[in-house]
Image (cartoon, rainbow, N blue to C red):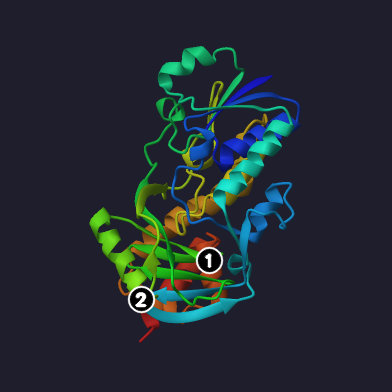
């Protein structure tokens, strides 16, 4: 079987590697030249469990820092520091090196990767020779013409690199906002900093990022770059005829945190399988849909900082992982109402 993959991000490269390893004839098309991959700004943080979906062992040169704890702030006010729970344990990676490693793995299994070839809907007739076309483009350049993207939603984010803070190298910062979040991720001698949010203008996000820079005494060493991230949860259907979609193009991003690499790697292991949708629905969909549901709920809660201060470490972890069910949410809301 011949498979065309669109996009050399984590989802596309994971697909190319796994499908080739399983004996499929894979050609991957990437719009950018290899020197420009990755072109999209990213926080470059992955939970420890993300590597379970790769052959990597955790000692590769793309790993810049090992994270052991997280500091929570609410609009500039320190709330708490959390250690020893899964979401706080992970890695800060050099995404360029990470993707290069995935490229090498995919090519070693026989995948053909063509850089500098942008695929659009006009190219679909030229892909007739493939039995399966997998859209891992991030925005669904092919899939959006055939699948239901009615609930697909993206928010703006800004990202940059900075120097000058004394945040420990094993600590990440999560900075809660009324309608979003900001982050600080240490990566060697630099810090990856950024901000994203619902219904913020780029100007408002830039002001928030400037407040973060001032708070931690950062000095920017790069320009601030803009992008967007999916927050609507996964689209309803992932397959139509020979077209399939995976990764952010399918909404496989945790809406509460913007985390997408882990889910992209998982998706790349199953997207080419006959029971792709069944596996996805049983293992990932509900978590991401709960994340989208929780985002809608939390956006409506006034004075969210008050609840963030009172919530337990376990509750925060389950919240950010999309593991809170409706009964849990009702209990939390009842507790919130009772907080003085």
Residue marked by disc 2: 215
Picture quadrant where residue 25 is located: top right
State the residue lying farthest toward the bottom: 340
- Left or right, 163 with reference to 321: left
Q: In front: 68, or 231? A: 68
Neighbour tally class for label 1: few under 14, some 14-19, many 20 plus, Cα within 10 Å: few
Whether residue 42 is visible to the viewer of this picture, yes or no, is yes
Where disc 2 sits, the SS reads helix
Which residue has dot 1 on it?
A: 189
Which corner quadrant holds the C terminus?
A: bottom left
Instruction: Report the Cα–Cα distance between label 2 and label 1.
Output: 19 Å
The quarter holding residue 58 reads bottom right
CB-based contact (under 8 Å), mark 2 and mark 1? no
Q: Position of residue 244 (x, y in %)?
A: 55, 29
- Locate residue 147: give its quadrant: top left
Q: Is residue 180 above or below residue 153?
A: below
Quarter the N terminus occupies: top right
- Residue at left 52%, top 50%? 260
Q: Is residue 56 above or below residue 247?
A: below
x then y, percent, for residue 163 = 44, 68
Residue 90: x and y in percent read 62, 63
């Amino acid at each position: 079987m011949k498979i065309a993959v669109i996009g050399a991000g984590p989802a596309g490269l994971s697909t190319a590697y796994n499908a080739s390893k399983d004996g499929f004839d894979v050609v991957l098309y990437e719009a950018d030249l290899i020197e420009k991959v990755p072109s999209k700004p990213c926080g470059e943080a992955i939970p420890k469990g993300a590597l379970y979906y790769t052959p990597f062992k955790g000692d590769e040169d793309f790993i810049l820092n090992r994270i052991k704890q997280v500091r929570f702030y609410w609009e500039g006010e320190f709330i708490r520091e959390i250690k020893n729970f899964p979401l706080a344990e992970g890695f800060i990676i050099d995404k360029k090196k990470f993707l290069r490693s995935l490229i090498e793995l995919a090519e070693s299994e026989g995948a053909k990767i063509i850089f500098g070839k942008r695929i659009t809907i006009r190219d679909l007739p030229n892909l007739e020779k493939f039995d399966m076309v997998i859209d891992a483009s991030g925005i669904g350049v092919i899939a959006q013409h055939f699948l239901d993207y009615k609930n697909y939603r993206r928010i703006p984010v800004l990202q940059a690199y900075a120097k000058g803070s004394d945040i420990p190298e094993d600590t990440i910062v999560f900075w809660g906002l009324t309608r979003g979040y900001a982050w600080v991720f240490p990566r060697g001698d630099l810090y990856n900093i950024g901000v994203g949010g619902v219904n913020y203008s780029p100007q408002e996000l830039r002001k928030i990022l400037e407040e973060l820079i001032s708070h931690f005494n950062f000095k920017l060493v790069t320009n601030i770059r803009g992008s967007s991230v999916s927050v609507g949860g996964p689209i309803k259907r992932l397959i139509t005829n020979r077209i399939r979609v995976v990764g952010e193009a399918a909404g496989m991003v945790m809406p509460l945190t913007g985390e997408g690499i882990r889910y992209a790697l998982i998706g790349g292991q199953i997207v080419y399988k006959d029971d792709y949708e069944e596996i996805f629905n049983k293992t990932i969909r509900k978590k991401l849909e709960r994340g989208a549901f929780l985002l809608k709920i939390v956006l409506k809660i006034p004075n969210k900082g008050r609840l963030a201060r009172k919530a337990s470490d376990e509750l925060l972890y389950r919240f950010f992982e999309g593991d809170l069910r409706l009964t849990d949410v009702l209990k939390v809301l009842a507790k919130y109402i009772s907080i003085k």
